[in-house]
Image (cartoon, rainbow, N blue to C red):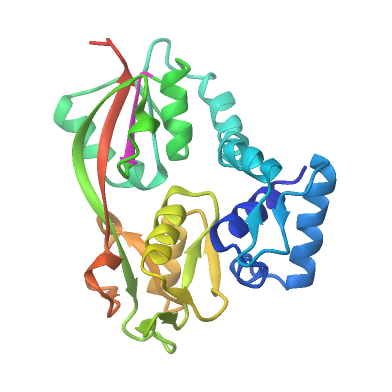
Amino acid sequence: MELQWIDDFLALCETRNFTRAAQARCTTQSAYSRRMQRLEDWLGAPLFDRERRPVALTPAGEEFLARAHRLRDEIFDARRAVLSVSSHLEKSLRVYTTNTLAATFLSPWLIARGLQNYSVIVASVSGCLEAVKRGHADLALTPHFGDAEALTGLEAREIGEDRLILVQSGGLKDPVGLIGRELTGALMVYTPGTQYGAQIAAMLDAHRIAIRARPVCESASAEALLAQVKAGLGAAWIPAILLDREATVRCAAPDYFDIRYKIVLARPAGQK
């Protein structure tokens, strides 16, 4: 099993089209198809019905999809969890949060509450919530897109809000725009399996909007994409909390391109 196989699988689940999935994964369709075949060989069952249009998941594919996001997150979070138990502090508050919130929202929040002697562990959204559920974290600060099931078993409250905005630099040579039902220009995307990526894909699918050309870059990091936006390499959906208004401009797009979400504080149910 290779991590890129999981990302490949999630890309095809989102696009239901081998050509578009290969484009999203920045590879050729033949190379992409070979990797998908290796995944199916490793699992021992076909995951997609290739005769249907759009491509459909088989029962085995549906079963693997239920686990794929969690597998991907756990692989990335495993190293962070191992490191987090080796603390220089004898007793510390263990705070899990995402990279974006750790770099922006977290510090003012900690200062306002006078918290001291704490450990900050950066993880994916699902990794943060899972850490609280398993007792590895005292609390988690994460984006929340309205999925009540994700917060099951936790006490959660909204402590802020933000939105994803499609932005580009003023000097981008191939600016991104919406022509009919196609998004054109030098677009950068989030890696399949990420919360941001899933929300953007769902919004585009709901409005039947396709991405015309192969994305110029994909990354799981909003900070990495923002750096490239500022360098004039492409456009991307970036959390508003990260944006420097002088360095980026909003792409011409409908209002529904803004993806709003809450910032929640989650802790074990019943904890004071």
Q: Is residue 70 left or right of residue 241?
A: right
> What's the residue at 68%, 48% (across, down)?
58
Q: Give residue 222's position: percent from left, percent from top.
A: 42, 57
For the residue pair 99 and 55, the one nearer the viewer reads as: 55
Please state which of residues 174 and 246 is positioned toward the viewer in this rendering: 174
Q: Residue furthest left?
A: 112
Give the answer, above or below, for where 48 lies relative to 109.
below
* Residue at image coords 34%, 22%: 118
Q: Going by the picture, which residue comes out furthest to the front? A: 52
Q: Main secondary structure of the magenta part?
A: strand
Q: Is residue 242 left or right of residue 157?
A: right
- Image location of residue 202, percent across then percent down: 42, 58
Q: Residue at x 47, y 37 (%)?
A: 123
In the rendered image, which quarter is residue 44 located in? top right
Whether residue 123 is situated above or below residue 34 in the rendered picture = above
x then y, percent, for residue 3: 69, 46
Q: Quadrant of the C terminus?
A: top left
Locate residue 226: give its quadrant: bottom left
Q: Is residue 32 above or below residue 7?
A: below
Name the quadrant of the N terminus: top right
Residue 205 shown in magenta: no
Q: Is residue 34 left or right of residue 159?
A: right
Q: Residue furthest bottom?
A: 173
Query: Percent from the top left, x then y, of residue 267?
Result: 32, 21
Viewer-nearest residue: 195 or 49: 49
Q: Which quadrant would residue 35 be assigned to in this image?
A: bottom right
**Range of magenta residues:** 138-143
Question: Count the marks: how many?
Answer: 0
- Side of 48 where 40 appears, left or right: right
